[in-house]
Image (tube, rainbow, N blue to C red):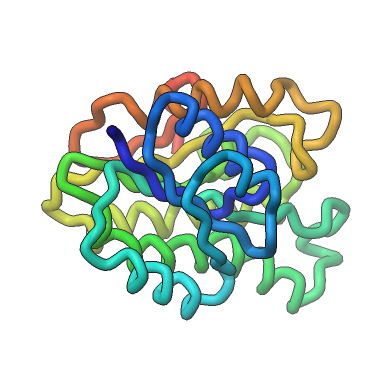
Amino acid sequence: MPTALIIGASRGIGLGLTAELIGRGWDVVATQRSSSPALAATGAQVATVDIDDSDTVTALAGSLAGKTFDHVVINAGVTGGRADTASTVSRDAMAQLFWTNAIAPIRAGRVLLPLVREGGSIGFMTSILGSVGGRTHGYAELYSASKAALNSLSRGFAVQDVGSRAVAVLNLHPGWVKTDMGGADADIDVATSVKGLADVIAAAHPPGQVYVDYKGSSIPW
């Protein structure tokens, strides 16, 4: 039975991915920041973690000592102020956006990496908006910058932290999804996104790093 740890699963893509993997017969530990009846209903083992609070991630790792996972996915993230730009955003709001979307996931990755078995993977839920090579628009400039920062930090994580271990690092774009974050005008529903993501995560990945969407297509860094 494959095993997975999903960080940030109380709603949206994280919740959908948890349900999808359990539906495939996986053993899943999933985290919530606050009580989520929907997550409890999936049958996952539920823990409470705030991605912004590294101590809660460390406590989770301690509670899981001795257990290993085939796959760890760090999904937590925020959009920030949708109308904010580099010219209008406050220093505090920008710091919070980058903390949650870029710094906290890498901190969590470093704490949780020892729980990933050899031959497994650790994934960061990013976005195609974090692609610098593919950025030909000015949409969501601050959110995009925070995901570009995550992508950059994860490159260092893959080299410095994973190093020579047989663990793949997956930077995952879930698509533009109809969630609270994605909005009602998004391209695809949660079920479509998480089915594709589950396929990508379950596929055999050699050691190294990839930046792919929910269909497994490569995205330019």
172 with respect to 192 (left or right): left
Q: Residue 12, percent across and down? A: 68, 41
Picture quadrant where residue 78 is located? bottom right
Q: Is residue 101 above or below residue 50?
A: above
- Identify the residue at horizontal 84%, vertical 27% (top origin): 185
Horizontal relation, residue 69 to residue 81: left or right:
left
Please provide percent x and percent y for residue 212: 44, 30
Given residues 100 and 119, the one toward you in this image is 119
Q: In this view, does 68 lie to the left or right of 139?
A: left
Residue 160 seen in the current view: no
Quarter placement of the C terminus: top left
The quadrant of the image that shows the N terminus is top left
**Is any atom of residue 80 visible in this view?**
yes
- Residue at image position (70%, 50%) is 37
Whether 21 is drawn above or below 93: the answer is above
Q: Position of residue 117 (x, y in %)?
A: 20, 49
Residue 183 or 202: which is nearer the viewer? 202
Location of residue 119 (image quadrant): top left
| Residue at x 39% of width, y 28% of height | 25
